[in-house]
Amino acid sequence: MTRIKTQYVGQWIDVTRSKQFTFDGTVVTGLHGDSVTSALLANDIWLQSRSFKYHRPRGPLTLCGQDANTLVQTPNTPNVLADRLEVEEDLRVSAQHYTGWLRFDLSRLLDWFGRFLPVGFYYKAFFKPSGSWRWWEPLVRSAAGLGVSNLSVSAPYNDKVYAFCDIAVVGGGPAGLNAALSAAEAGARVMLIEQEPYLGGSLSYHAFNGDMTATQLRRDELIQAVYEHQNIRVLVSATCNAWFSDHYLPVLTSGRLLKVRAKQTILATGSSEQHAVFRHNDLPGVMMCSALDRLIRLYGVVSKRPVVVLAGNDLAYQTAFSSQDAGAHVSAIVDLREHCDDPALAIHAENRGIPIYKHCAVFEASATTLGLELAKIVIHRLDQTDGIGEKVATIKCGILAMSVGFMPAYQLACQGGAVLNYDDETAQFSLQNLPAGMHIAGSVNSMFALDTVETDGQNAARAALRGLGMSVEADEPNVCHQRVNHPWPFVKHPDGREFVDFDEDLQIKDIVNTTRMGYRDIQLVKRFSTVGMGPSQGRHSALPTARLVAATTDRTVTETGVTTARPPLTPEPLGLLAGRRFHPIRRSPLHHRHVALGAHMMPAGVWQRPAFYGGTERRKSLIEAEVSAVRTRVGIIDVSTLGGIELRGPDAAEFMNRVYTFGFIKQPIGKTRYAVLTSEQGVVSDDGVAARLGENHYYVTATTSGVDQVYRDMLKWNAQWRLDLDIANVTSAFSAVNVAGPLSRKVIETAGCSVDLNAHDFPYLACKEAYVAGLPVRMMRVGFVGELGFELHAPSPLIGELWDQLMTAGEAHGIRPFGVEAQRLLRLEKGHLIVGQDTDGMTHPDEVALRWAVAQKKAFFVGNKSVDILSKHPLTRQLVGFELGTSSPQPKEGHLVIHDGNIVGSVTSCEYSPTMNKIIGLAYVHPSDSAVGSTIIIRTDNDIHVRPVVVTTPFYDPNNARQTL
Amino acid sequence: MPLGLLKYGFKRDYPFEAEADIPAPSDLKPHYDVVIIGGGGHGVATAYYLAKYHGITNVAVLDKGYLGGGNTARNTAVIRSNYLTPEGVKFYSASVKLYENLSNEFDFNIMYSQRGQLTLAHTDATVRAFRQRAEVNKHFGGRTELISPDDIAKLVPMLNLNPANLPVLAGLWHKDGATARHDAVAWGYARGATQRGAQLHQLTEVTGIITEGSRVTGVKTNRGSIGAGAVIQAVAGHSALLAEKAGFRLPLVAYPLQAMVTLPVKPFLTPLVSSSALHCYVQQTSRGEIVIGGGSDPYPLYNSRATLPLKESLISSAVEMFPFLSEMRLLRQWAGITDMTSDYSPIMGLSPLDNYYLDAGWGTWGFKATPICGKTMAELVASGGKVPELIQPFELDRFNRFEQVNEMGATAASH
């Protein structure tokens, strides 16, 4: 096959730069600018894939990435469109979805058995005897699928780009170029998005008015003006792959996803050429006229194979002529119509020596001996009613180019809510009900003659400018009379294999039989037959399916409609969408100090916290040592992740009183109070400590994972209550450490403290603003771990220094940092519950003995109504403490509590307590088992039942003597 | 090849009409014993069981669109019973049991495939919750266990065990987890129901509920009014709107839920895999497509449009779990509308009207319950309002009684 490079032929290729790649192991030489498909065709390789169901040989259909016939794979990537894949040196491409060899596919057997595989056959078989689908499914699964995933590929790091414009123009053909220019002239910022590597669209491959020279002059003029215009940003090789609400457009480029926010969108997306439906219309060599035009004009591939053109409109004649001009042998034009709309074309063809078969159809195509490529076609005359008449001729040909109609590229518009209406007169779908700010121009708007296309682009720009609030002149009157769609390009064959949907191997009878089985709605037709579900998402099957279903179910084509268009427009790489894969974690300001101390970090919500300090192999003993340090000397823990909320204002106390269950109006300044939140359902939802720092100033903590919700809820409530206060989430602004243990007071005193820490001046539950080691802190005496302890909250930038000073001061006292694991154990020894661990989405205060934290005489707090009602219900479960001897199997958190053979609750916390040398835990039990001394039954691993005894909590220091020292 | 397919090949034009799965459209009758609003899986399943077990066949199933076109068409076909509450586990287990034999019962292959479902735990809290779910499941005879990262690696070798810096600590392995061809479930039920005499009316929208005192006497539709002895509403995402037409409110909030699918590739993944922390699940269909789904959209909305931010975050999570997915191509993204209850359990049973029954609150968990819903709703209607024990915990009145059935933790992103 010759490669031709002239002004009008082979525009995209560079004949001086050859590129070698392999296709299915064979070395192929292409040219710079080739797609893999065009290079293969230049080497006369037409068979490029196998079809999904019958494994029929398939070759290029559209040459612009609109069909599934060129899906190939590269070593890392399955399902790549070869006609969108640029050739590169050493590129390795292989065909996919075949058994054996591409040219000799053993799965082709399925085609011969096709008659036994009616549409939806898998619903009718493979399940008898019962359960046999289990054996059939793996067979069906391995027969399905297309490419093969390379499971060892790692994910790339792809940045994304945010971009903005006034008007996004999608499509750089004649309509889009005009729209962009008109809009830019008026002062709008325009982004012109073209999926091919060059602007121009059909101006590059279609001879409008039969004049390629004039067409291309016009093209060059437009492109130059566009590139010279400072208001236009041009993106080529960029696909606007969806239209999301409010003109949010994802644009795919190589290695980048652009997220474009436009104010108006002009779709100049063109239209998809449609195929004729006849027997063996899927053979390699059968292609769209526009595909043959592209092959010659863009890639300079002129085949020696004889060409026949199947015409349903006048446009097809231009393909015949331009192919002949480029050196192809055009053997015939088969015209479905009685005559051309423009009589001059027929005369022109005659002068060129191209015979025309008028009012004839291709009855069937047949393949070469190996069955792999088109060899000849049989022509039949059409009768008065467009039915099939007598045979007219058999014509040998290697290429059959068809142009029988167009479907607007409706996808982006329909994603925005536009609908398609069918006009029986023009046999065409057109778009209606466009969303606000969306405009269409060019052949997507049923404009085909060049002057109307250009005017339409300008008119769309005017509409968009009006949408921007600019005043512009009235639209140019513009009507296109050119007819492009043949109403019924179907030729039913007694032996079938007239394909409606190439992706899914669906023939006329499959669609018809689907409706005969009762699946009449177009959506059900799709779901049952799978029409339109394939990689090209119905680009070529929607129109013929709508026509067939309308005819068989006695409805109009508009009533029948097409299936919903969903994003994306073209299959998009997941790697581009995933982008950087940004899954943020949060670290305390002390993070690096913990790491330096050898901490084993664990996730706590989005935070990273030290679980314990030291190697995991000594986990148990390290945790025990940390516990022991707190119980006997002093420990320090980073509690920066605790939520912190600041409430200031005259109504702060009133607000606290409404949000939390306790009474806060009378809380003294300088005191802390346990603060529980209940939801409107009366469920315990969070807890913390509220410190009253001033008359109008509270500082409240919340759980690490709960604070965001607590803060949101507070804002929500106050949006309704309108109380006079300011609420701020200061979780990040403040960081905190807790110094706990009998020697904690000494450590802080050693570090230097501006206030007296003795039990009289700074008693249990007191809070003060003070200086420790010269640093400003909010100090609270709280007792989560049940020892003398101080929680020091400091501005985050100072917490590192505070930690260092305390560690230095504590050295002499044997201070030891402790992690979350030790803290959990310490608090369990004290019987304190953790909201979220010892409570669930149903826990109300009575179930967990928190009644004491609920004010009895308050008129209102969030959830009080529910809490009141719930307290009148008999309890169905209760959280209790239990203990077991060390010889017993240790229950795990989540194990069930069984009562009379029924599940009554579960273990929420359970640990071995080194302090007590017992297994201790908390569990929900049946109320009748909640009394101290009762025995409960816990089912542990391997169905072993253990019978712990219910005991009072705290397990440790039941009189709370140590924390009040 | 199965012998059952031979008959199709030996006749040039097999008479498909003779055994049409769905009968041709017909006129509405003036009165039906039972009118079911909503021709999704639940609606047609109810009609099927009414006919099959209770001999009630003067039944109309009405749908404003097409058969199974709502959430039956949009869900991602997860079938499982590894819930948290005893009420939930009993209910969904009964559904799984019915699913197992459904193809043969229908004589129509719903492609029920018990591939197992694996949910990943990345935090201690999740491990605790998973252990409890495994234990509750075992208690009721289900096959669910907590497995280690090593076991996970054997089960799904291509899974990244440290996705997004959230190491996998354990997995909840639910052997009974399954999938099926979701549309076929609706078709199978519709076929069985109509063969027994029930009528399916598509493109028939209910515009009002006709009542006399506390009784429903009929419904108004865009094709005229019809009388009804009893009415069932089974309209998923639009439950609250329909209830309003019937004159009462349901405690439901509608959220869009999105899912997406890639181009098909050869099979590599058998179980359904989901991550509790990444709110993402991944499975491979029989066609070879990878289905990716996750949590609902973050705000209430009655609109099934797809959005870019959700797609980006969901795919970013999926790629963390299976890095090689980055080289695969997304084909389609869609959404449904889910009617969420505050306790993540359905609302089934009686309504404030005497002979008007509720099948609502199906949020993101409706598909898996299709068979048992149909069966229990049929029993409820046939008995004239005696609520079957299995669905008593899900009655609307539970919200007044403060007896919610909390499945929040067991629902999340696994659906």
Image (cartoon, coloured by chain):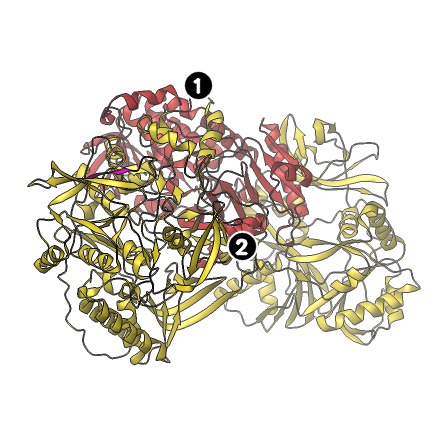
Depth order, front residue of A666/B86? B86
**A664 left or right of A305?**
right
| Residue A746 in magenta stretch | no
Q: Is residue B124 above or below residue A495?
A: below
**B392 left or right of A408?**
right
Q: Distance between the residues labelled 1 and 2?
A: 42 Å
The region drawn magenta spans A363-369
What amino acid is at disc 2? Ser
What amino acid is at disc 1? Pro
Question: Residue at image x 29%, y 42%?
Answer: A374
Image quarter of residue A894: top right
Q: Where's residue A143, x and y in %? A: 44, 34
In the rendered image, which residue does mark 1 sit on? A129
Image quarter of residue A211: bottom left
Q: Where's residue A825, x and y in %? A: 78, 48
Q: Residues within 10 Å of mark 2 (few under 14, many from 20)?
A: many
Q: How crowded is mark 1: few (under 14 residues within 10 Å), some or many (20 or more)?
A: few
Q: Tell which chain the image draws in red.
A: B
In the rendered image, which residue does mark 2 sit on? B316
Q: What element carries label 1?
A: loop
Depth order, front residue of B341/A152? A152
Depth order, front residue of A132/B362? A132
Image quarter of residue A198: bottom left
Write down the chain letter for disc 1.
A
Q: Is residue A177 above or below residue A412?
A: below
Q: Tell which chain the image draws in yellow.
A: A
